[in-house]
Image (cartoon, rainbow, N blue to C red):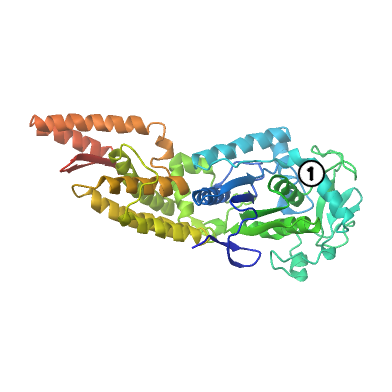
Amino acid sequence: MSLQLYNTLSRSKEKFVPVSEGHVGIYYCGPTVYSDPHLGHARAPVLFDVLRRWLRHRGYRVRLVSNITDVGHLVDDADEGEDKLLKRAALERLEPMEVADKYFWSYQDALSLLNVERPDITPRATGHITEQIELIQELIRRGVAYEADGSVYFSVDSWDGYGRLSGRTAEDQEAGARVAVRSEKRDPRDFALWKKAEDGHIMQWPSPWGRGYPGWHIECTAMSVKYLGAEFDIHGGGLDLVFPHHEAELAQANGAGLPFARYWMHFNMITLEGEKMSKSRDHFVTLEELFSRFDPGAVRFYLLRAHYRSVVDFTEEGLETALQALRRLRETYRDLNRRVSEPDSGARHPALDVYRDQFTAAMDDDLNTPQAIAALFEAVRDINRTLAGTDIPVDYLKAAQALFADLFDGVLGLHGEPAADSGDSDQLAGVIELLLELRQRARLNRDFEASDRIRDRLAELGVVIEDTAEGSRWKLQ
């Protein structure tokens, strides 16, 4: 089966065919860096991290680009009002770039804990003003944009394709306009490409239309095309970005004569108590808060247990359940790593190939991570039954370890150990192994009181000892 992806543009699953054979270009909209990242900000990087890992597993070379918005994103995603970053800068009494850097690194630190690999390119809007101005000039030249009193607007009425991504009619578009028509706008649906800077506006640049700053939508169009080309493979983001942001991006690109993205991937929302997380309503949970109480790997696992096009309603009970399930997978992986001295990523065994096939079929079916994870749990049952026996074939052990290394760790990025313990995992294992040696020595000396004391004390600390014909094994509860 070939890889199938749901394309918002066609509203159907399509066979994935890249623009250039063997190469894939992906762009997804990153955050506006004006406050600490919350759980809702984690879904995009985790999703596209797994997509990139899967594409590489399938043999593709991938370039992943994700931007940082540090100017032009106004309150309520409108063409009027305060810049979100400037508003925060005034509140914290900092320079705008201080705010951008502060929350940019907060975001990056959170992604590292989630085991998200960095994008290949992370462009900032403020670093690409020239490209945005050039694109706006081309739109004016082609007659689909106009200047008015120092600002420039895209003329929706002049572009018949506007609405084909979101499926909105002209009436829907007008009803969805966030603000009343400004006097210089020809149509309430028109959106800003360049905004005239009002007196006292800190972030502004010279342009052919006077000093100003870019509109939010033009930024992503300019940056994605610069690094991925006039036509590239995948553009992604949340469903809340389909309109107006991605609709505007597509109109700008096509209006300038650029084919733009072939596939549009949109993930659904993360809700809290049934409502979308929102900073404006103080209705969210920060990643820093979550990581102080839960293993970040469990948060990643929690997100992957739901299909990316499904709503995730966050609850601590659900996260705790995910943590317990993740521990089962980690225990098996840890056991295999202890038994296999020389891992072989190419190892296969007929008894385990069925689980690889199930995993592959799930991932190729629009990145169905819940079904892929289900395949791993099926594999765990088979593997643990085999490990409980005697005379385990070496090729089976190597194939089982390779399956987890390739898919659980390599594709899903879930690690074999909790991220919070990753720095101490080797030391912890060494200490436990030493205690098991002391316990075994006590048993050989028929000092069963000491042997039982070590076992019971370890159990109190969450380390379960299993005595088998091949020796003692341990696992964390």
Q: Residues within 10 Å of mark 1 (few under 14, many from 20)?
A: some
Q: Which residue is mark 1?
A: 131
In screen coordinates, is 472 left or right of 201?
left
Residue 55 drawn at (x, y percent): 53, 51
Q: Quadrant of the C terminus?
A: top left
Q: Work out which residue is located at the far right of the displayed protein and give it.
A: 149
In screen coordinates, is 159 left or right of 2?
right
Residue 306 in view here: no
Asked if residue 145 is positioned above or below residue 94 in the image, the reply reads below
Marks counted in the figure total: 1
In the figure, residue 253 lies in which quadrant?
bottom right
Asked if residue 272 is positioned above or below residue 10 in the image, the reply reads above
Residue 141 drawn at (x, y percent): 89, 54
In the figure, residue 473 lies in which quadrant?
top left
In screen coordinates, is 268 left or right of 360?
right
Q: Work out which residue is located at the far left of the displayed protein and give it.
A: 446
Residue 103 drawn at (x, y percent): 63, 38
Residue 22 drawn at (x, y percent): 58, 51
Q: Mark 1 is on which residue type?
A: Glu
In the figure, residue 210 lies in which quadrant?
top right
